[in-house]
Amino acid sequence: MQAKLIVENVSKTFNADRHTVTALENTNFTVQANQFITILGPSGCGKSTILKVIAGLEDPSGGQVILDGRQIHGPGKDRGMVFQSYTLFPWLTVKENIEFGLDVAGKSKAERTEVSQYYLEKIGLKGFEEAYPRSLSGGMKQRVAIARALANDPQVLLMDEPFGALDAQTRTVMQELLLDVWEESHKTILFVTHDVDEAIFMGDVVYVMTARPGKIKAAIDVPLDRPRKYDVKVSDIFVDIKKELLELIREESWKAANSNI
């Protein structure tokens, strides 16, 4: 069976302050359809960069990304992205934010309303349709951002530390909410995080990246049954995977801390 997404020998260099920085080097991995992939690595290892390359927001310096058998060139509606920062349009209501991509695509008002109402129900924001982002909490804003991305029905959802700015309790709720939505939609998801527990709890496979220049160091399968509840985090399997990942991350974090540009 052909993989949904193939990242093949991808490299990426930037020019910064008269230095050439290699963010990614010979990065290779594959993602099957409907998989939930999480990506871990030390700060500055290129986690966000690889998502931007897959999204078409950055061109690779070398290698290629193939989605459904076709090489990616630039952004496309087959990919949606959710960032850590709150990227809602402040002049639009919750409902209008969710419907924005559908409006641009020329969908009818009835179609837009049907989709937005479905996701307002799924993300627990029914009754907030006419609210503006300024009146929402951080967790509520990210719910809207996720709903907006999913409303466009992308083949792949790319998530760059979407819960990183949230407090611990809200983060836990958002993890379970996203998994509930994923259990129904089974979108292919790539989810970048710094949190080891989050990577294990959310993912089918955890990819660990090396210190810069980033590449895949290890792929750790997560053989935990789905659907998952929060108490799985104290299971023996979860703890064993966490120990393995912490050691891998520790090695790379030391390298990152002692490296020079």
Image (cartoon, rainbow, N blue to C red):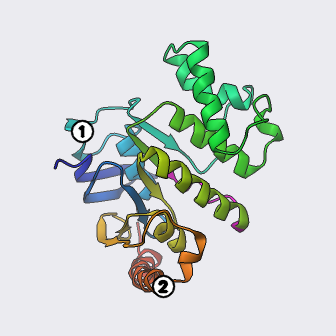
Residue at x 59% of width, y 39% of height: 147
Q: Is residue 25 above or below residue 86?
A: below
Q: Is residue 67 left or right of residue 183?
A: left
Residue at x 72% of width, y 41% of height: 125
Q: Which residues are magenta?
A: 159-168
- Give 93 or 12, whichever is nearer the viewer: 93
3D distance between C-alphas at marks 2 and 1: 35 Å
Q: What is the secondary structure assignment of the residue under circle 2?
A: helix
Classify residue 212 by image quadrant: bottom left
Instruction: Verify whether residue 119 appears in magenta.
Output: no
Could you say where residue 190 lies in the image, as x and y percent from the top left?
41, 53
- Give 78 or 28, whichever is nearer the viewer: 78
Give the residue furthest to the right: 135
Q: Is residue 188 left or right of residue 228?
A: left
Q: Is residue 5 left or right of residue 186?
A: left
Going from N to C along the chain, the mark reached first, 2 or 1, is 1
The amino acid beneath tag 2 is Val
The amino acid beneath tag 1 is Asp
Residue for badge 2: 239
Q: Is residue 64 above or below residue 213?
A: above
| Total marks placed | 2
Residue at x 49% of width, y 42% of height: 81
Could you say where residue 83 lies in the image, as x and y percent from the top left?
56, 47
Residue for badge 1: 68
Could you say where residue 44 lies in the image, as x and y percent from the top left?
46, 63
Specify the quadrant that holds the C terminus: bottom left
Could you say where residue 39 lies in the image, as x and y percent from the top left?
41, 62
Crowd tier of the residue under label 2, counting other residues whose Cα lies within 10 Å: few below 14, some 14–19, many 20 or above: some
